[in-house]
């Protein structure tokens, strides 16, 4: 099944999303008027709302309280068209745009935010460009950037991060990053 992920560049009020959903003829699947606490792994600290799209795809809005990122996961044959419609209506970013931004000369705060966003919207299948960007973040001189990269590695759930996280877990000068990366090692799938 095709999947697209897209993040909002700034916070979006949920009523604007419901208006967009109505304009696209989406049918609500969540039995509530508002987002509900997430139940999937890595989503316990988020709120989600799900619609069925016109072509029986799924549009899931996620408001992640940990990464502080609002984003959509779109699944189905119409996922690209629905992502395009969201981009025309709201200020959004794709993982490709996020990678381009992270490749530039940006502030530490923007790098932290970019890594957090990349972690939740990058494709779930392994992509070398995403991997290298997060791996570079794990080697940053700044503890806050390394923390954001650890968060991205956890969200992406790729075993390929294990060697870099092992280094962080034993040698990072920040005890919080050592603990976070150690916990990440227990959560990630084993190396193959």
Image (cartoon, rainbow, N blue to C red):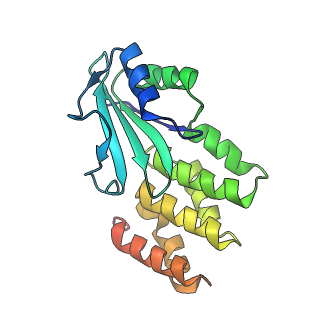
Q: Is 154 located above or below residue 69 in the figure?
A: below
Q: Is residue 39 left or right of residue 153?
A: left
- At horizontal 20% and vertical 34% (from top left) the residue drawn is 31
Residue 164 image point, x, y percent: 54, 71
Q: Is 173 located above or below residue 71 in the figure?
A: below
State whether residue 117 appears in this view: yes
Q: Quadrant of residue 177?
A: bottom right
State whether residue 122 appears in this view: no
Pick the quarter of the image with the N terminus.
Answer: top left
- At horizontal 59% and vertical 82% (from top left) the residue drawn is 174
Pick the quarter of the image with the C terminus.
Answer: bottom left
Q: Is 156 located above or below residue 172 in the figure?
A: above
- At horizontal 42% and vertical 29% (from top left) the residue drawn is 15
Residue 96 image point, x, y percent: 60, 39
* Viewer-side residue, 192 vs 131: 131
Q: Is residue 163 left or right of residue 110?
A: left
């Amino acid at each position: 099944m095709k999947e697209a992920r897209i993040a909002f560049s700034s916070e979006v009020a949920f009523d604007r999303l419901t208006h967009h959903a109505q304009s696209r003829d989406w049918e609500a699947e969540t039995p509530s008027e508002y987002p509900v606490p997430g139940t999937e792994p890595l989503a316990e600290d988020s709120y989600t709302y799900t619609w069925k799209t016109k072509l029986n795809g799924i549009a899931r809005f996620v408001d992640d309280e940990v990464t502080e990122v609002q984003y959509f996961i779109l699944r189905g044959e119409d996922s690209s068209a629905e992502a395009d419609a969201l981009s025309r209506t709201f200020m959004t970013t794709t993982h490709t745009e996020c990678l381009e931004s992270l490749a530039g000369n940006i502030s530490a705060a923007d790098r932290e935010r970019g890594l957090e966003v990349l972690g939740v919207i990058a494709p779930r299948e392994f992509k070398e460009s995403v991997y290298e960007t997060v791996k570079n973040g794990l080697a940053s001189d700044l503890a806050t950037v390394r923390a954001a990269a650890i968060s991205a590695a956890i969200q992406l759930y790729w075993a390929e991060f294990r060697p870099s996280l092992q280094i962080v877990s034993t040698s990072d000068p920040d005890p919080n990053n050592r603990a976070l990366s150690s916990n990440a090692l227990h959560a990630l799938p084993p190396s193959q």
